[in-house]
Amino acid sequence: MTGEVSVRVCPGGPLLVRGAEVVVDDAGERHPVTRPVVAVCACGMSGRKPWCDSTHKAVPAQAR
């Protein structure tokens, strides 16, 4: 990997990951990153895990 990887927590939303070449999910599956910045699901409700699909906007905060 070249360069630095950074993660920004978006309150109530996804994790914005910058500079990664791959994201490894909780099952150990590797997901190649094809963009400079990707949004990783933090609420656990996305239909496109590990990527955020904005489901968090429709789910009440207490259900996340």
Image: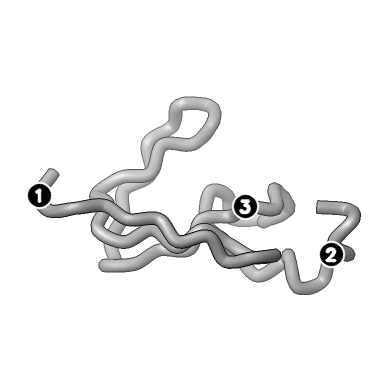
- Residue 3, compared with residue 38, is above or below; it is above
Left or right: where does residue 42 sit relative to residue 2? Answer: right
- Tell me the colour scheme of the image: one colour
Image mark for residue 42: 3
Across and down, in percent, residue 32 comes to 31, 48
Q: Residue at x 84, y 64 (%)?
A: 59
Q: Give me the C-alpha separation between circle 2 and circle 1.
A: 36 Å
Pointer 2 local density, CA inside 10 Å: few below 14, some 14–19, many at least 20: few
Q: Residue at x 73, y 53 (%)?
A: 45
Label whose residue precedes the other's in the sequence (2 or 3)? 3
The amino acid type found where label 1 is placed reads Thr
Q: Give me the C-alpha separation between circle 2 and circle 3.
A: 12 Å
- The answer to which quarter of the image holds residue 22 is top left
Helix or strand or loop: what does disc 3 sit on? loop
Left or right: where does residue 35 sit relative to residue 56? Answer: left
The amino acid type found where label 2 is placed reads Val
- The answer to which quarter of the image holds residue 14 is bottom right
Pointer 1 local density, CA inside 10 Å: few below 14, some 14–19, many at least 20: few
Image mark for residue 2: 1
Label whose residue precedes the other's in the sequence (2 or 1)? 1
- Residue 35, compared with residue 4, is above or below; it is below
Image mark for residue 59: 2
Across and down, in percent, residue 19 comes to 24, 58
Left or right: where does residue 43 sit relative to residue 39? Answer: right
